[in-house]
């Protein structure tokens, strides 16, 4: 029972893509759902701020404010946001998903350029529980942002067996 943190990457002809996701196995504690919503919101807000000419550190700060608000909520365990909240991704070298063109962090001097694909990754270490994060890829553009993957609702892996059996029985009767 607990957090299951996964970051999956794919590569074809040195073009890289990545996706980060977290699930909670078992009955999630009360802090899990609000923190999940905050991290998903940080992805959307980071993507919305990723416009040509934007300072990478400002995009990072926008995501950090959302995470800090969630961290301050009563009952939320102590958490630390990772130093990097995003990076350019796409044509990379042989050993890393990130192509090294841009990074989103508090000290970055990078300025976002149109057409650059960013892996937006606001993720945290939750004290006593492990890592938690969600991510997506967005292309920097003047147009409203579009995430590469659709955002899906959380699916906590905690359905009691009797519910699963009942669902299976009702399907068999149909």
Image (cartoon, rainbow, N blue to C red):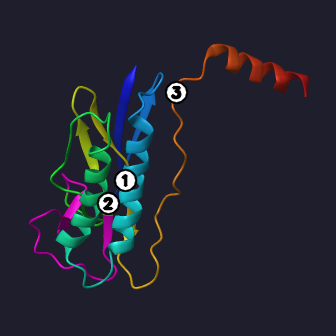
Q: Tell me residue 3's x, y (percent).
A: 36, 29
Residue contact at pointers 1 and 2, CB within 8 angstroms: yes
Question: Looking at the picture, does residue 57 appear above or below residue 51?
Answer: above
What kind of secondary structure does the magenta stretch mostly adopt? loop
At horizontal 32% and vertical 33% (from top left) the residue drawn is 75
Q: Residues within 10 Å of mark 1 (few under 14, many from 20)?
A: many
164 left or right of 107 in image: right
Residue contact at pointers 3 and 1, CB within 8 angstroms: no
Q: Tell me residue 121's x, y (percent).
A: 30, 54
Checking the image for residue 120, the label placed there is: 2
Viewer-closest of 162 and 19: 162
Q: Residues within 10 Å of mark 3 (few under 14, many from 20)?
A: some
Q: Which residues are magenta?
A: 94-118
- Which one is earlier in the sequence, the residue at label 1 or at label 2? 2
At horizontal 35% and vertical 58% (from top left) the residue drawn is 42
Q: Tell me residue 22's x, y (percent).
A: 39, 39
Per the image, label 3 sits on a secondary structure element best described as loop
Residue at mark 1 to residue at mark 2: CA–CA distance? 5 Å
Q: Which residue is mark 1?
A: 135
């Amino acid at each position: 029972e607990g957090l299951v943190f996964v970051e999956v990457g794919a590569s074809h002809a040195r073009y890289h893509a990545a996706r980060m996701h977290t699930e909670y196995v078992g009955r999630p504690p009360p802090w899990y759902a609000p923190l999940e919503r905050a991290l998903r919101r940080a992805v959307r807000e980071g993507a919305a701020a990723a416009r040509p000419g934007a300072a990478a550190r400002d995009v990072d700060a926008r995501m950090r404010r959302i995470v800090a608000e969630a961290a301050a909520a009563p009952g939320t365990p102590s958490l630390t946001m990772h130093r990097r909240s995003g990076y350019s991704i796409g044509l990379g070298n042989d050993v890393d998903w990130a192509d090294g063109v841009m990074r989103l962090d508090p000290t970055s001097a990078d300025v976002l350029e149109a057409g650059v694909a960013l892996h937006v990754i606001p993720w945290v270490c939750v004290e006593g529980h492990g890592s938690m994060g969600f991510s997506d890829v967005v292309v920097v553009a003047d147009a409203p942002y579009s995430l590469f993957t659709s955002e899906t609702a959380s699916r906590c892996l905690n359905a009691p067996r009797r519910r699963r059996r009942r669902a299976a029985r009702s399907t068999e009767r149909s």
